Amino acid sequence: MRSVLCFGDSNTHGQMPGGTPLDRFNPFERWPGVLRRELGPDWYVIEEGLSGRTTVHDDPIEGALKNGRTYLRPCLMSHAMLDLVIIMLGTNDLKRRFNQPPSEVAMGIGCLVHDIKELAPGPGGSVPEIMIVAPPPMQDDIKEWESIFSGAQPKSRKLALEFEIIADSLEVHFFDAGSVIETDPSDGFHINKEAHEGLGVALAREVEAIGWLNEV
Amino acid sequence: MPDMRFAPPNPIRIADRASGLNAVSVRSYNERLVLSLLLQNDGISRMEIGQRTGLSAQTISVIVRSLEKEGLVATGKAQKSRMGPPTIPLSLNPAGAYSVGISVGYKQTNVVLIDFVGSVRFHTTLPNPEPDPAINQTEFLETIKAAIGALPANTHDRIAGIGLALPEDQYELAHAPNGALERYESLREEIEAHIGIDVYVQNDITAAAGAENLFGAAKPLTDYLFCYLGARLHSRLVINHQIFNSQSTQSFDVGLLNLEARLQATGLEADVIWERSADWPDLGPAENDWQNACVAQIAQSTNALKQFVDVKTIVLSSYAPHKVCQNICDQLDDMLPDVTAIAGTLELSPKAVGAASLPFSSKFMVE
């Protein structure tokens, strides 16, 4: 059986648009659940989505626990061996408090890729396949989140290109979620049930396209 | 020492995403490897590319995505497989790149425009360039422009280049007017100056071999004897897809010139044999005699070559009618039981198609 780790933020956690981290789509509705259904019994799909997770920043407000980089290493060790790691992060790095341009967010993603390669939690201590997924762009109207994310909307539209540049440089897989789904207008940056379904199906096809030998 | 992992990203493949083709200098060996594989094997999957090249899945993923964005590669519909996950076939996008090919022949010049998978989109013939440019240079250049004009203007940036196949056979050139060879040699500069597209030059027989190799009957073959039946009979040895480009100018007088002489000796009109893509009328015993001589020469060459290389296949390329080539191949099969003779599939102008493949080889393929 092959293992895939889905490492992300609230949109991997399955937080409902306009809701709180406790308002969560059920395990079959969230994109990792859709991915599990689509990939079938040969795959073990591990969900690791935390609301507010950043790529590499300790959040001065929400706490150091939101730092994706410090959590990733023990997380990889807990779930080794892994055949594939999917990372979909970046939206929270665009919060006003971090003051980051899209290129720096991509650099943060790059750090996570380097950490995975260094730890090599793949079969036999190899580097697993790594897929960077650019989150779908935010809507212009992000309701009461405007103050927290002020100025993030145009940056969010540039994440896909910056992430692809990093993916090309580091030679890892890349997928632009914005090519298949949109964020929900009720809060402007979370994805709804239909988008979870669409993303899970699209990612399953991407995972299959990598090509996997039959013996598992 | 700085940690180079965190230096600015250096994405050599992503380049300009607006449109058009990447510059030659940035096309990596691995990209060429993938494109060459796709040309040989339409519809293979990313995993098969990995198995054949030894490249990692992630490297292939990056290369294929970039080639897809450039419009050079197209992804097909997922194919369900009985075992394991569905596979996604990849192929070259025919409209991803174009090329013009010009071959100066014994009687006339052929001009073609081909797409990325070798389909001829435009073909015409015109008189060979005269030693004095004043006579027909304008017609020559206008024909090249017409070939380019066969494409919509917004795809002109997808023209990889112009290939020029030139004759080197001394017997054939002996029939050309004085000063013709010098004129041919200056064509490259003339075309580049007037059309403004890079020109690649190659020996015409090697070009024809390249055409059958890339796009024609020889595509699935790795080792074979290539025979070109033109005014004379020429050969090239192909081993592991590589055309052995010797300096040998040996050719044999069993080609169309020989047939022409035989027909004229019996008082028959011979013009029809130089016309392309038309079946010949019944030419009587002269044709049979010529065919036997041609078959005997190819068989003799093959047997001589067998001392050194275990030739299993002969590919016969020509602009003579397919039926004539097939007859010669059938006779060869009878005469050489352990050899298979295959008639080429590029009937219009193998040399010009081969010339057109030169810019593709130079810009997109591995040697």
Image: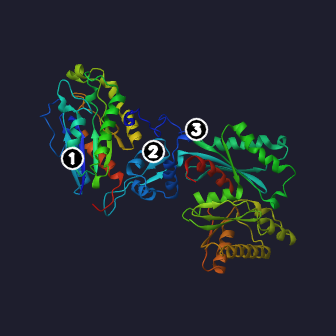
Q: Is residue B135 left or right of residue A169?
A: right
Judging by the rendered image, the residue that carries numbered circle 2 is B68
Q: Chain of mark 1?
A: A
Which is nearer the eye, B223 or B179?
Answer: B223
Callout 1: SS: helix
Q: Which mark is residue B157?
A: 3
Q: Chain of mark 3?
A: B
Q: Which mark is residue B45?
A: none
Q: Quadrant of the N terminus of chain A?
A: bottom left
Q: Chain of mark 2?
A: B
One can see residue A61 in this view: yes
The quarter holding residue A61 reads top left
* Of the image marks 3 and 2, the number of the one nearer the N terminus: 2
Q: Is residue A159 left or right of residue B240?
A: left
Q: Position of residue B299 (x, y in %)?
A: 69, 75
Callout 2: SS: helix
Judging by the rendered image, the residue that carries numbered circle 1 is A77
Q: Position of residue B128 (x, y in %)?
A: 79, 50
Which residue shows up at 39% across the image and 32% down it? Answer: B2
